[in-house]
Amino acid sequence: MSEELFGSLRRKGQRRKAEEYVRGLLASSGRKTLRNIAGGPEDQAALQRVHHFISTSPWDWMPVREALARYVRRELAPAAWVIRSTVIPKSGPHMIGVDSRVGAARAKSPSGQQAVGTWLGSERGVVPVDWQLCLPERWLVAPLRRRAGIPPEVVAGTVDHCLREALHQVVAFGRAGGEPVVVDCPEAHTVDLVRELLALGLPFLTRIDPTTPLRLDRSALPKFGAGERPAGDLVNAMPQLRRRFESASGLTTAVSVPVTGPGVARSAGMLLTGAWPRDGAGERTLWLSGNGVSSPGAVLGLSRLSAAVARDGTAVSRDVGMCDFTGRSFPGWHHHMTLACVAHLMAVRAGLREAEMNRGPACA
């Protein structure tokens, strides 16, 4: 496994250091800082080696992520790519990408990093395979840009910009399995996002704001009006289309209506689905799907993968130090996040092995 994931690292010493770093993420207690991973404050030489490998060494993280994605697809048979935005709370302004406005708006923290993560998810587990860091403008100005080692081609990134980068990276990873893309980013501009997904030919499911304007597809619902209405109103106006679905998590009530959007062709086959947990009670969520994701059952199944990333994936990622990088180096952040993704995979595999052992051998 190690040779497969780290084979792109040219030198044997780099591969060994990558393995040691992953082991440190899994084994060290407390926050997974460079100092803790190096073995504590006593061994300054080890700390310098770890710091150099993560923060300044010029190894390319993208081949490692591509190898990770291939491995996860083969081992976990994922049902979808899941792309979610997240805020990583940070307490100081000198850490890479920190913006005081991010934490104040999203995380009840004075500052934070805004990032977009790409995960592969199945019933067996969810694993992150790629990350985009949304950089505020202040990080793109000298001398801060030079100190952080931010490459010339990197530009300031809103969540929408990072989403586009994440989607193009999904295409670059290769989609031999034809997995759909689930996007759960409340900050995204839905119409622009859908146009990008359609242009890339990706089957998709995206969470949608209730105020987003849409039209009923009158080719499927000819008796209803063709005016533009907020997505939430369209779902509420169709109680006769409500159906109940049963799953392992309980009953879900859903309404699905065919829709079109501004500048979107009807051939996209878009479906607006409103879902209520607990048999119609609880908070409603709205999802827009298309390019082949065309049934309420498929929508509800894929939406549960996004919930799994938010619930199970976040818990594992926290344990392996996904939020613990405290440096100002742009390559360092990506190196740390890449190896934390590998550590996340290792933790998921260990959990699967433990679950199989607890189940015991099947009865003859």
Image (cartoon, helix red, strand yellow):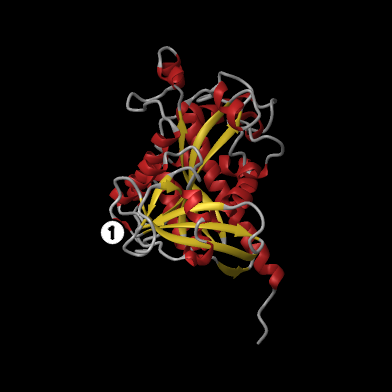
The outermost residue toward the top is 143
Q: Position of residue 133 (x, y in %)?
A: 47, 33
Q: Quadrant of the C terminus?
A: bottom right
How dense is the environment of label 1, judged by Cα within 10 Å: few (below 14), some, or many (20 and up)? few
Relative to residue 153, is residue 285 depicted above or below?
below
Q: Nearer the viewer, residue 77 or 194?
A: 194
Q: Is residue 45 left or right of residue 14?
A: right
| Residue lying at 40% horizontally and 25% vertically, measured from the top left | 156
Q: Nearer the viewer, residue 245 or 319?
A: 245
Q: Choose top left, top right, bottom left or bottom right for residue 138.
A: top left
| Residue lying at 28% horizontally and 59% vertically, measured from the top left | 267
Relative to residue 128, is residue 266 depicted above or below?
below
Does residue 75 show up? no
Relative to residue 61, is residue 326 depicted above or below?
above
Q: Choose top left, top right, bottom left or bottom right for residue 259.
A: bottom left
Relative to residue 8, is residue 301 depicted above or below?
below
Q: Nearer the viewer, residue 72 or 23?
A: 72
Q: Position of residue 201 (x, y in %)?
A: 30, 54
Q: Is residue 268 left or right of residue 335?
A: left
| Residue lying at 49% horizontally and 42% vertically, measured from the top left | 185
Q: Is residue 3 left or right of residue 226?
A: right
Identify residue type, mark 1.
Answer: Ser
Q: Position of residue 310 (x, y in %)?
A: 59, 48
How many labels were placed on the picture?
1
Q: Choose top left, top right, bottom left or bottom right for residue 362.
A: bottom right
| Residue lying at 68% horizontally and 34% vertically, measured from the top left | 31
Q: Secondary structure at mark 1?
A: helix
Does residue 108 show up? yes
Which residue corresponds to mark 1? 267
Q: Nearer the viewer, residue 281 or 96?
A: 281
